[in-house]
Amino acid sequence: LVMIAVIMIAHKWKMNPDNLATPLAASFGDVVSVSVLAIVASNLFIVMQTQIWILYAIVGCYLLILPLWIWIVLKNKYTRNILTSGWVPVLSALFISG
């Protein structure tokens, strides 16, 4: 609904909606993602104090489905190369940020 309003306002002001809606959609998505991550992290931190097994169960589930995702990536010719060579930018960013 927010994006519809942005597009309607852009048309009313005779602006190109692509120049206005695209950055706003990206920013809105970032805000929502960070908010969800903050809420999940806060709840997991509270749970960690009393029921630490839930954290181990979450990590275990991720480790169990990891081979499935690796298999899916290796089957796709467009993403296969990224699995082997795409780690350099990620690890470089982690090293730089400390």
Image (cartoon, rainbow, N blue to C red):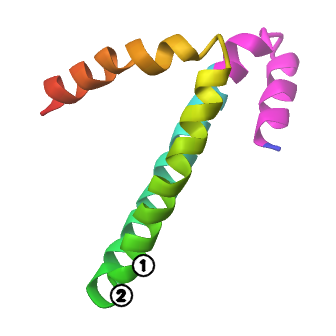
Image point (22%, 29%), residue name? 94
> Where, quadrant-wise, is the N terminus in this rendering?
top right
Helix, strand or loop for disc 1: helix
Q: Distance between the residues labelled 1 and 2?
A: 6 Å
Answer few, some or many: residues within 10 Å of disc 1's Cα (few below 14, many 20 plus, some between 14 and 19): few
Q: What residue type is disc 1 on?
A: Ile
- The answer to which image quadrant residue 55 occupies is bottom left
- Label 1–label 2 contact, CB within 8 A: yes
Q: What stretch is highlighted in magenta?
A: 2-22
User: Residue 15 at x, y = what percent?
Assistant: 78, 10
Instruction: Tell me which residue sits at (60%, 26%) in the image.
Output: 73
Q: In which quarter of the image is residue 20?
A: top right
Q: Residues within 10 Å of mark 2 (few under 14, many from 20)?
A: few
The residue at 35%/21% (across/down) is 87
**Eyeballing the image, is 10 above or below 28?**
above
Does 71 appear above or below 77? below
Name the residue tied to disc 1: 54
Comparing 21 with 38, the one in front is 38
Residue 43 in sight here? no
The overriding secondary structure of the stretch rendered in magenta is: helix
Q: Percent from the top left, x then y, of residue 8?
A: 87, 27
Asked whether 57 or 39 is in front, the reply is 57
Q: Determine whether, in the image, residue 92 is placed left or right of residue 14.
A: left
**Residue ID for mark 2:** 51
Could you tell me residue 19's position as x and y percent? 69, 11
Mark 2 residue type: Gln
